[in-house]
Amino acid sequence: MIEIAPAKAGRSLPWANWFPAGAPGPPALAEHALATGHGRWWADRPKHPRAVAVRCAEYAMLRGSPEALTAADLAPLAHTYLDVPPHFQPLLTAAFDRIALYERTIWICADPPRSPRPVPDGITLRRLTAADAVVVADLGSRLAWISDSWGGPRMLAASGHAWGAFAGRRLLSLAVSYVRGERYEDIAAVTLPEHRRRGLATSCVTALCGDVRDRGRAASWTCSGDLRMTMVPAWTTGFRLVRDYAHFAVGAAVGADRSGAARAHSS
């Protein structure tokens, strides 16, 4: 596949309706990439493409005709959670060294969201601003994924789509609209390990849900069905299960290691 510019990946193009419109959860990924400019797009050819892919952070979507692609074309989608129609599965098997089906659940927030419990003494709950980029980065490498869909800590902090719980200047917990669709904003949250079980994520999520509502959208939440702790902020805030969802976790592109070794040997 060849990479295409985000400015040329608009909803007005004929293939744009191949991607879900107005859907909650990860299926809103294409809308997020179009609206925010954070994401990369590929097609099998620049004009009248037969297959188109989008990737943002660790998520990707692929639509169109698998007959238009070879296994090697899917290399840019390696190491992602990949949303594809069933007829792409044989191509995935040929393209990656590992594929596994992951089942998720999608939840929608009640309108209005529940009121959060009071935050602990010494904690300030507020919307993030551009000045908070450093404290987002200070969350550390294990929680760094939370800003990936916005292009990093600086973009997340300035997005207007995140709330945090602070102790002084230190950010303890953060909730963000990880995927911003046209009708739904899919929320994700993190908390520093030593400050978990204090209700901080729930407070951040509840405040963010109010912003989402004010923007005329609904908040959604996506999590693994077998990880109860990932559901706690959603359930406490008033989210309710609406449907199951599945995508593939794919590994390295087949042949990637061999070709890398060959280049290293020849250099």
Image: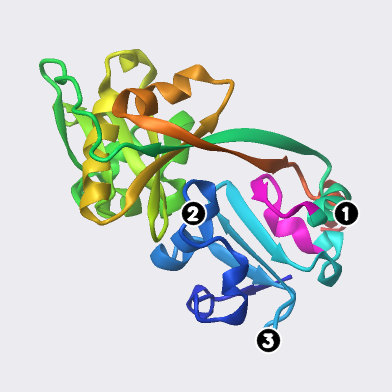
Q: Which residue occupies 69% across, 64% down?
A: 63
Residue 129 appears in the picture as rendered: yes
Q: Quadrant of residue 209?
A: top left
Q: Are marks 3 and 2 in contact (CB under 8 Å)?
A: no
Camera-nearest label, 3 or 2: 2
- Magenta stretch: includes residue 123: no
Does 155 sit left or right of 42 as displayed? left
Residue named by callout 1:
262
Q: Position of residue 242 (x, y in %)?
A: 49, 37
Residue named by callout 2:
23
Q: Quadrant of residue 127?
A: top left
Does 61 sit left or right of 216 as displayed? right
Task: Report, in whole angstroms, how far the alpha carbon at label 3 lies from the one at label 1.
Answer: 33 Å
- Magenta stretch: includes residue 83: yes
Q: Position of residue 148 (x, y in %)?
A: 46, 47
Residue named by callout 3:
47
Q: Secondary structure at mark 1?
A: helix
Task: Report, in whole angstroms, how far the alpha carbon at label 3 lies from the one at label 2.
Answer: 27 Å
Magenta-drawn segment: 73-86
Q: Quadrant of the C terminus?
A: bottom right
- Callout 3 crowding tier (Cα within 10 Å): few <14, some 14–19, many ≥20: few
Q: Which one is earlier in the sequence, the residue at label 2 or at label 1? A: 2
- Callout 1 crowding tier (Cα within 10 Å): few <14, some 14–19, many ≥20: few
Q: Which residue occupies 69% across, 58% down?
A: 76
Q: Position of residue 219 (x, y in %)?
A: 35, 44
Q: Quadrant of the N terminus?
A: bottom right
